[in-house]
Image (tube, grey):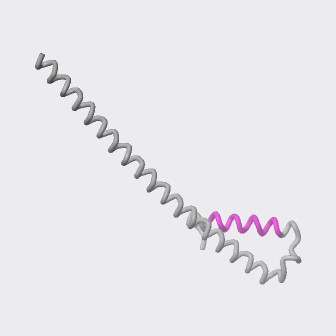
Amino acid sequence: MSQVLLAEREARDAVERCRAEAVQILAEAEEGVRRIAYRAEVRIKLAARIADRAVGRTLRERQDTLGSAAAVSQAEACELLDRVVDELADEIVGGGP
């Protein structure tokens, strides 16, 4: 009888250790998710700032050469937009200014 009680206590202790380990694993995983979310948010904000600067810079350059936005045809506007997007993509991935 004492062997059965001992085995039962050991089994309960093992289950409790497993439960505590699972709680620890879950806490570590949640912390990992929080770190990833934070890094993603930082990178998204950086990409937005880069995009804002690139668009602003390109618009200023184009306004200087074209005089006013009203003088830009639809074809020129599409071409300008394509160039801005290309420049922005280059800058975000590290290939541009």
Residue 66: name its quadrant.
bottom right
Q: Is residue 19 above or below residue 80?
A: above
**Which residue: 67% across, 68% down?**
87
Q: Residue furthest top?
A: 1
**Which residue: 16% across, 18% down?**
4
**8 sits to left or right of 34:** left
Q: Position of residue 91 (x, y in %)?
A: 60, 68
Q: Is residue 30 above or below residue 92?
A: above
Q: Is residue 52 magenta?
A: no
For the N terminus, give its image quadrant: top left
Q: Position of residue 54 (x, y in %)?
A: 66, 72
**Residue 18 or 52: which is nearer the viewer?**
18
Residue 60: name its quadrant.
bottom right
Q: Is residue 81 magenta?
A: yes
Q: Position of residue 67 (x, y in %)?
A: 83, 83
**66 sits to left or right of 38:** right
**35 sits to left or right of 49:** left
Q: Is residue 4 above or below residue 83?
A: above
**Residue 65 or 57: which is nearer the viewer?**
57
**Which residue: 35% across, 43% down?**
25
The rendered magenta stretch, by its main secondary structure, is classed as: helix
- The span shown in magenta is 77-90
**How many badges with numbers are in the image?**
0
Q: Position of residue 85 (x, y in %)?
A: 70, 64
**53 sits to left or right of 40:** right
**Residue 43 or 72: which is nearer the viewer?**
43
For the C terminus, give its image quadrant: bottom right
